[in-house]
Amino acid sequence: MNSKPIQIDSASVPAHIAIIMDGNGRWAKAQGLERTAGHVAGVETVRTVITAASEIGVKYLTLYAFSTENWNRPPEEVAALLHLIVVALEKETPDLVKNNVRLNVIGDVGRMPAESYDSLQRSIAATAGGTGLQVNLALSYSSRWELVEAARRIAARAVAGELTLEEISESTVDSMLTTAGIPDPDLLIRTGGDSRVSNFLLWQIAYSELYFSPVYWPAFTAEDFLKAVADYQRRERRFGLTSEQVSAPDGGPIG
């Protein structure tokens, strides 16, 4: 018996979805494969989710591909993963261009090997004209690193006399982050069964809806992605207000 198609309300699609793509290694182990096989399989899921996000009208998709903590993994796994990123980018870039997808990167990419960095820059340049979905790859990224870097830039401006203490605001911090100019995520999805955010977009997800899936990333389907979006659409986002205030005709307090 076929399951009922998941209904998505086109009027309330999250503009920005962030995903912690977790479970590659555990999926591979369950299949009796090497961990690197899980990363390879995970690339197929990236393609599937990018397509699904584009089809329903998501504007920004941020994918946690490689954290600063991942540098501490076994060297052979790190090397294999970074090489896979190069291969995947070279293979997928023509389709990204064809589908009007723009590629962006956030993170300390200066730490990446030259081969990986150069391939990344070529893909970013090739897709620069895309006006559809923007895919942000979080590579060599961690939120604490990002916030420390932002604090340093703010301090440097203050020392230079370009910024007073009174002028420092939330918007000042926003402008110093790697996501400057990108709206905060409406929805954060984590696959793989763990219920934590793992140093990802800590500032930006202050009011994001969180969705934790038990499915390992390589097994995560377009249907699983749509389930997360449908779950998001059933929630009431209050941003500190009451339900009555949110439902007021003018969006403001009732009474």
Image (spheres, grey):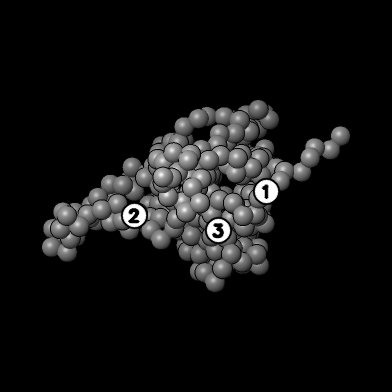
Q: Badge 3 is on which residue?
A: 59
Q: Residue 140 in the image: x percent, y percent?
A: 42, 48
The disc placed on residue 174 is: 2
Q: Amino acid at mark 3?
A: Lys
* Residue 18 seen from this side: no
User: Badge 1, how many Cα within 10 Å: few under 14, some, many 20+?
Assistant: some
Q: Amino acid at mark 2?
A: Asp
Residue furthest bottom in the image = 129
Q: Residue 149 in the image: x percent, y percent?
A: 28, 51
Q: Is residue 249 above or below residue 1?
A: below
* Residue 241 seen from this side: yes
Tell which circle, 3 or 2, labels the residue nearer the N-terminal end: 3
Q: Nearer the viewer, mark 1 or mark 3?
A: 1
Q: Badge 1 is on which residue?
A: 8
Q: CA distance from mark 3 to mark 2?
A: 19 Å
Q: Nearer the viewer, residue 167 or 136?
A: 167
User: Badge 3, how many Cα within 10 Å: few under 14, some, many 20+?
Assistant: many
Q: Residue 114 in the image: x percent, y percent?
A: 44, 58
Q: Nearer the viewer, mark 2 or mark 1?
A: 1
Q: CA distance from mark 2 to mark 1?
A: 31 Å
